[in-house]
Amino acid sequence: IAGNVLYGGNINPCDFNCSTAPHYCASNRHVSLIDFLKAITHLGQHNGNQSAMISSDATGVYHCVNDMAMPFDTIPPISAYPGKRANISIITIGQLNGTSPDIVTYSKCDIVSCLNPSIDSSVTSCTTPSLKATDVQSTHQYCTNYAYLVTGNNNKAYCMLLSLVLTRAYQKSDYLIPYQVIINVAQCPFGFTIWNNALSICSADDVLVKHNITSDIDGLTVLRNNTMWIGNSSSNTTLAVHLNCPYDYCNTSSITFRIIDEQDNQCNYNRTGVLCGGCKPNMSAVFGSNRCMPCTDKYLWLLVPFSIMGVALVTLLFLLNFTVSVGTINGLILYANIIVPGIVSLFSYSHTRIFIFISWLNLDLGIETCFYNGMNTIAKTWIQFVFPAYVLLLVGAIIFVSRWSSLLTRLCRRNAVAVLATLILLSYTKILETVITVFAFTEIDVGNSTANNPPVWLADGTILYAQGEHVWLLAAGIIVTVTFLIPYTLILLLAPWIQAKSHLKAFAWINKLKPFLDAYQAPFKDQYRYWPGVLLMVRVVLYLVFIINGGKDTSVNLLDINLILCFYAIVSNRLSVYKNWPLSVLENYFLINLIFLSCTLLYIKDSPTYSKILISSGGISLVVLLGIIIYHVYVQLKGNNFLKHHVIINDRPAPVASPYVQTGLADESEKLLLNYGSCECREPLLEDS
């Protein structure tokens, strides 16, 4: 007895003491003592007075539902994975159905049939793990969770009937209440497997162990760090890990997520799928960033202003002679080709507005936009080829029509070839970046799995490399590389040596390209006419690093820019490749800008001050760009005055040296015009074949 509680032992030998309750005995002799004690216990529990109870030793185990004891025939099945503890809510009771704390453990298991369609009928027996101290658990006066460690059978699904028993209580078959619960033992969940048959429990997949990834079988979760990606392989049959998710596709913070249904939690900007390569439903890939955003088909109207932009760009180059043959924009183009894909794209988009105009020199839109609902990375990549081709066709059409129009030739001021050469150079880096993106692939680590795991396209991991839609894109990339990128690079690099052999029949074709070659070589000294090809090789090396690195380590891009441009600047200035020092000064400014920017960001790239440095770099370069434009406007206006004040020689107007000639920045066509006069120079803009 303890206070109002009477507990312990067997109450069957107990009887009424009629000497202390004669009146009760006289009137209730037909009531047994056990019934009397049950009534007191029931009354105490009903009134919420747990202290007014009478209980024997525990004689059975009841199942609990919502903290209420239920008969054993209403026990619902429990599901668990091997290695996971099945929590069984129980309470132990005594003879009077009152709570009676005791010690519980399991005794045996049996294979039973159940309504689980995934069970393996080949499983005919089960074994319980050896008893440990943690398997002997105490109950209380309230419902308690008994944790049973479920073990597997060669990773097969089956149903087992588990029996729980009391270990120290008064036990007599007349009063023992059996407790058995059905446990649906499932196969190991995705990301876990039984790779140690001795333990017969689900453990982390070997690919998780290989990369030291923390996992939890109870919550079916994994902990992902840094730029790592974890999810379904491309075949959707095994777990895969990739250490470097493509830049901006995945968030870089540590995150815990359910491996079964929360893989997209590691993706940025509405992305989904393998390597977060695709866009979620109702989202579209956009230009100008790696985000996925809502889009409608109304955005197709943007093709109109972008088409006008192409015409405006070509017109600007024609009117201002803003071409590579003058040489004032060579350093600017190199700066634009490197800073936008190599540096700006690796930092916050909020700091890129100042680079919109510079992005146009890369034939980029410079803003985040899409064209239609459902646009994916495949379509986005195809469109990357379109705008360069469009502006080249504009100039090509002008040159073609000029064969039959003297008026058009005069309007174009004989710089159509230089404009075309400039646009080809602008298109080169855009096409080069796109082609490298098309060719880039990666493989995802599936550990020791024998499942087929082909490589995936780096730009969109949901697309298998060289399969399906990517086949046509890959074919286009090969054609463009073979017919344009490689020949264009080699011709500019080797032109001086090929031209020296042009008297030979095998190299006579180089003479047909002389107008183009003159446009590129005009700013450079004769002995360095191959220098345009060197500049192309600088771009190729840098872009290969940018694409292959994929932004997974910004320091790689920055160090690459720093080393290559430093080496180039030293060699270029040592050789003094330009004919005129102003051109060398302009190029050196842009080189110093890039080198200083990359060095600074290399050390403080994690600091908020990097935005100020980026804006300063872009702002100063934009001012220089405006200065170059003003210079070209001035030269063109001054040139028009010269045309008005001409002299007469042999009854015809004699040309006066243009401002470009006077300033020492004339291209070959300007010098030709000065020496022979405009009438003698009348000829098609391209040499006849």
Image (tube, rainbow, N blue to C red):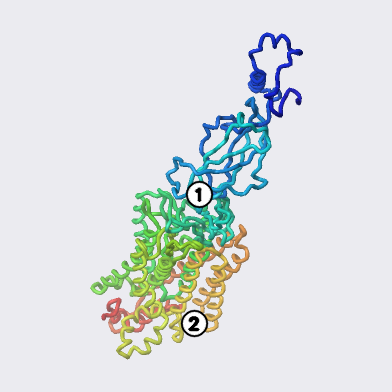
- Quadrant assignment, res 636: bottom left
| Tag 2–tag 1 contact (CB < 8 Å) | no
Q: Which quadrant does the N terminus fall into?
A: top right
Q: Picture coordinates of residue 134 (x, y %)?
A: 66, 45
Q: Picture coordinates of residue 298 (x, y %)?
A: 35, 49
- Quadrant assignment, res 425: bottom left
Q: Which mark is residue 540?
A: none
Q: Determine the secondary structure under disc 2.
A: loop
Q: Is residue 535 above or below residue 456?
A: below
Q: State which mark lies toward you, 2 or 1.
A: 1
Reading the image, the residue beneath label 1 is 262
* Between 253 and 13, the one nearer to me in the picture: 13
Dot 2: few (<14), some (14–19), or many (≥20) neighbours within 10 Å?
Answer: many
Q: Is residue 603 above or below residue 680?
A: above
Q: Picture coordinates of residue 391 (x, y %)?
A: 35, 66
How far apart in space, not on screen, are marks 2 and 1 (Cα)?
A: 58 Å
Identify which amino acid the numbered label 1 is placed on. Answer: Glu
Identify which amino acid the numbered label 2 is placed on. Answer: Val
Residue at 48% x, 42% y is 112
Q: Picture coordinates of residue 447 (x, y %)?
A: 51, 62
Res. 387 visible in picture: no
Reading the image, the residue beneath label 2 is 577
* Between 557 and 653, the one nearer to me in the picture: 557
